[in-house]
Image (cartoon, rainbow, N blue to C red):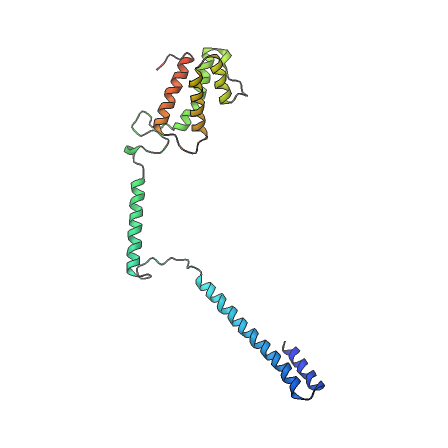
Amino acid sequence: IGISAFDIITRALLVDPGKMTVIIAGGSYFLMGFIAVILGFSRLYTVKRALSDIPKSQVPINEKDIPKSVHNLIVSELTRVSRIALAGEPRPEDGGRPGWGRPGSSYNNIHFRSSIIETLSLIEQQAVRCSLNLARQPSMSVQRYIDFLIEHKIDRELGHAYVEGYERARFSDDEVPEEQYIKFMKLVLQLLRQLGFNGN
């Protein structure tokens, strides 16, 4: 820009020895340079301000970093949250983990969902003991197999209730509660008895 300005001013002097052309050319370049400097400083200020607005990597939580009243509020809230978290932790006497039998109960260490899914193989085995004609074909879904058993041996209502409970346990995102598990296992026992099971 400096060389270009010098060149234009020199030519202006050669073309018009008067000072007016030189003043116009020089003034234009001075004004352009002044605006460029202003814009540069403005940009620098904007960038510095934007950088200062970025949160610090360390959050000020020490008492010396923030007002005492704010620090006390943070401490009291953290204490309250930790108490709530501790109160929410499952204890053995409260029932243990969701979807598992309570420690010390007859369902101790039983995962209800897995146990429900395994009942299908129990039904298949008992059906075959009852009659080889009741064997499940590899292509049969649970629904189709239970429908097949309904046609030959078991109660329709019980069969449909079994499929509903089985699929809910298998495909639901929620763990199976103990009460639902007990109810389902009673239903399974009834189905097994209809297939000739004589145990308790």
Task: Give the total number of marks visible in the rendering.
Answer: 0
Corner quadrant of residue 182: top left
Vertical position of residue 78 compared to residue 106: above or below: below
Vertical position of residue 10 compared to residue 191: above or below: below
Q: Would residue 90 be found to the left or right of residue 121 on screen?
A: left
Foreground residue, 168 or 74? 168
In x, y percent, where is residue 55? 42, 59
Q: Would residue 156 be found to the left or right of residue 90 on screen?
A: right
Residue occupying the far bottom of the picture:
18
Corner quadrant of residue 176: top left
Foreground residue, 143 or 195? 143
Vertical position of residue 53 compared to residue 137: above or below: below
**Quadrant of the drawing holding the C terminus:** top left
In x, y percent, where is residue 105? 30, 26
What residue do we see at 51% from left, 70% from top? 42
Corner quadrant of residue 155: top left
What residue do we see at 67% from left, 80% from top? 8
Foreground residue, 136 or 24? 24
In x, y percent, where is residue 33? 58, 76
In x, y percent, where is residue 102? 32, 30
